[in-house]
Amino acid sequence: MKRAGYLWKIAAFLLSLCLTLLVGALALWINGVPVGSTYARLFAGSVGSISGIEGSLAYATEIGFTALAASIAFRARVWNIGAEGQLMMGAFGASFAALFLPLPGPLLLVAVIICGAAAGALWALLPAALKIWLSVNEVFSTLMLNYVAVLWVDYLVFGPWRDTSMGGFPYTKGFPDNAMFPVVGHAEAHFGAILAALCAIALFILFRRSRWGFETAVIGYSEAAAKYAGMSTSRIICEVMLLSGGVAGLAGVGVVAGSAGRLYTLEQGYGYIGILVSWLAGHNPLLVLVMAAFYGLLLQGGAALQMAGVEPSLVRILQAMMILFGLASLTLVRHWGQTSEFRLWLTQRRLQFQLAAKDAGSDAAREFAPDASLRYKSRWWHGLGAFGGR
Amino acid sequence: MQRITDRPSQPAADRVVLRGITKTFGSNVVNDNVELTLVRGEIHALLGENGAGKTTLTNILSGFYQPDAGEIILWGKRVSLRSPKDALSLGIGMVHQEFQLIDAFTVIDNILLAQERAELRLQRAATARTLTELGSANGLAVDPDRFVWQLSVGERQRVEILKLLNRGAEVLIFDEPTAVLTPQEADDLYLALRRLADAGKTIVFITHKLKEVMSAADRITVLRRGKVVATVRKSETTIEQLASLMMGKDRPAQSVSARPHCDPAAAPVLQLIGVSAVSPRGHIGLHDVDLTVRSGEILGIAGVAGNGQSVLAELIAGLVPATSGTIELDGRDVTKCNPLAMMKAGVRYVPEDRVKVGLVPELGLTDNLILRDYRRPPYGNGFWINWAQAHHRLAALVTQLDIRTPGLDANAGKLSGGNQQKLLLGRELRGEPRLLLVAQPTRGLDLDACATVRRWLVELRNSGIGILLISEDLDEIFEISDSLSVMYRGELTTPQPTRTSDWSSIGLLMGGDGTRGRDA
């Protein structure tokens, strides 16, 4: 039964991909951009070359962490939309360790990772405390703190931490080598990707097997039931926020200690993309990895297109369409899988169709199978129906 | 059994007649050749136990169901009601137990939403004026500009009534209108219903509460197992007669046999001494409550819903703090204990709201089985949960208690109410409780499931556990409790042995007075 659920999801994913390509082709064509060669370049830029794959992986790592952060929180219905700010603070914490802690060898990298995660976690603790003691809705507090964190990093790189030897650029000094993630591949992909995968697996096990995972699931579905079960909802909300913030902080660590090697005015938006990706993956950590990888391809392909001179806004439109179609088809699949009326309808159609097929040439056959191609399609569709749903 | 039928003398143009209504669901005959006559300007009560077919009958009258046989004659004309919309356009409207209002809208917007034909421009001001007039004329005043979420339950009900009046309803049907109301709100509702009836509306309400019938109705139709057993005028009947009509026999004094003598000197398990508490939802709290549950005793708490029973249950479960007084369990002070500590001390709790509190319907049966015991072996194992063991125990429990489920991996929401209750009870009885706290254990269950649950409770009592049974179902309390106490507006009467209590005096205590003054 479960596997059939995945079948549906894969079908939905392919459907949305096709729709995106189709509507995207239309958008390109209207704008007079050659469709075929643009798609070829998109493909080549993301998966068609080593550097393309590495670039995709770098994007995927960053999104993967923020999406995992979102999945931790959303599973427990704690609306932490502050992965953006926690990422910024994570980058800040990592940079602090890299620039100012005089630690030898690999110890420094360990300190960088810990400081980054801790900074992200502490940044999430503030909204958690406000929620628990003052009932402040975490949506507002986490969102507002995102802006604070972005401006804090800007302040550091334009002000006290600016490397004056770099001319006018808002950079800090470069990190020492032993504060950097080992590079995986040539240049862009780094150890963070492996860390993200390990994180996802650990979270998957934590969610499924541990007491804590059980507690967060119960809280997510019903706070009243959680209280009745003797759980301390404040404690769990607090822990959820800490863990979520910590994982988002790792995204920031990856940016500064993975590829850049210094703190700078970080590109914004990955925290919010993470929210989308987590929803697309149904807050399942392993699916989050898959979706993040796909989104990484999309971003890298988009960057390649921009370098090839395609209007950046067109690239954005393609990306946005992917998300829209993806969400829409997933919602549809979920709805179909759960709506008994639809299942009933499907069964009835299947029965009617079987009758019609038996009695080919009759009125019923003509009504339900006007031509061979449609009949083939219907059969394929019904096959899915037989497996599908829960 | 004699058939009493009161035949009204009004002309056909002032009558709504349901003739020969039969409705079956599967092999279950829910309404069997039902005859019902309503008269303009009367308040008509449909009285019967759970499953007597009251709700089905009103659903037929309001167009939700189509009868298998029979006809409806509205003001002298035969009508066929294919949908609630049909019924409403002919002036028949229903107020359901679950209000159909949008919380995020204001009162006026809800009224506009329910209007049959919305014009392009919403007539907000005009409708507000109509609403205020309708409200003040019928004792149903509600501020049109307030949001529904700001209203009390009673006020929401008024909005539902105003919705129907605004649509021009002449026949108003209420499904257990007072089940969710406080006694004061109920009094207000009955005043409003009386005014509506005086203004020529026809009011029908469903209930199983005898006292309510006697105070509010003009005529009463009693249903039993899908059949009409009598239609009587209030002035010509008594509570005792109605009770026996409804039950079909004279009430047995004790139906659970083998009742051991409860030792009045047995050790008290739970003691509440002068406890007061505040309702977290702003309802009636507890005021200076004293209570003792002894080992091997079922203490029944009777009362109309909303008199503080849920606070009492939550207080003992540790979910609501006491503002004063002491709670003792086996002589130990547990006043300040949280739910977890209470559970550890041996208080197991079957909450009133099975679906939202007792179980998590979206999670699987196994998750629900371990919901309260996931910390301890065999389920909890330090940091991890031993799912294999939990699945194993679930399989055993399902067989042992005969829980009917589509599968062991089903979600708890897929079970019927009776099976959910079995799962819940099965879970709460593990781990040798000292005190079992059960609130409305048989609400919404079919008769078989009710009998099973009650049998279990008695068996548990016989094994020496103290049971506090909170129930609105007076029959249940009389059937299985050893002593009983009545809760009214947050206060508890002195417990009395069930054996020597009589049904009608308890009914009166539930209404807040020990004399018959109000009914006579």
Image (cartoon, coloured by chain):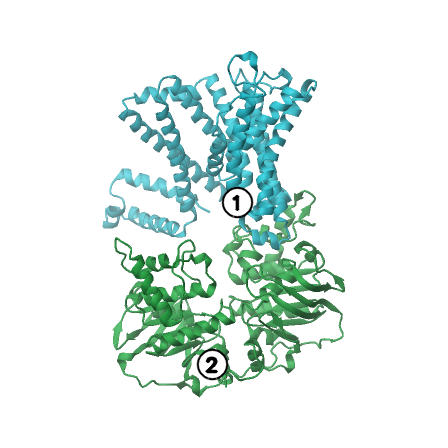
Chain colours: A cyan, B green
Q: How many marks?
A: 2
Q: Quadrant of residue B41?
A: bottom left
Residue A137: mark in rendering: 1
Secondary structure beneath disc 2?
helix
Secondary structure beneath disc 1?
loop
Q: CA distance from mark 1 to mark 2?
A: 49 Å
Rendering coords of residue B109 (x, y %):
36, 56
Closer to us: B239 or A96: A96
Residue sitting at 30 percent across and 79 percent down?
A: B15
Residue B74: mark in rendering: none
Is A305 positioned to the left or the right of A59 in the image? Answer: left
The answer to whether residue A16 is above or below residue A340 is above
Chain name for mark 2: B
Crowd tier of the residue under label 2, counting other residues whose Cα lies within 10 Å: few below 14, some 14–19, many 20 or above: many
Chain name for mark 1: A
The answer to whether residue A194 is above or below residue B498 is above
Closer to us: A246 or A206: A246
Rendering coords of residue A115 (x, y %):
64, 28
Is B135 positioned to the left or the right of A254 in the image? Answer: left
Residue sitting at 42 percent across and 80 percent down?
A: B220
Rendering coords of residue B252 (x, y %):
58, 81
Q: Quadrant of residue A377?
A: top left
Tag 2 residue: B214
Residue sitting at 44 percent across and 88 percent down?
A: B236
Task: Give, as a three-letter code, the residue at label 2.
Answer: Met
Crowd tier of the residue under label 1, counting other residues whose Cα lies within 10 Å: few below 14, some 14–19, many 20 or above: some
Rendering coords of residue A261 (x, y %):
57, 18
The answer to whether residue A353 is above or below residue B7 is above
Is B432 positioned to the left or the right of B509 in the image? Answer: right
Q: Quadrant of residue B303?
A: bottom right
Task: Give, as a three-letter code, the residue at label 1.
Answer: Asn
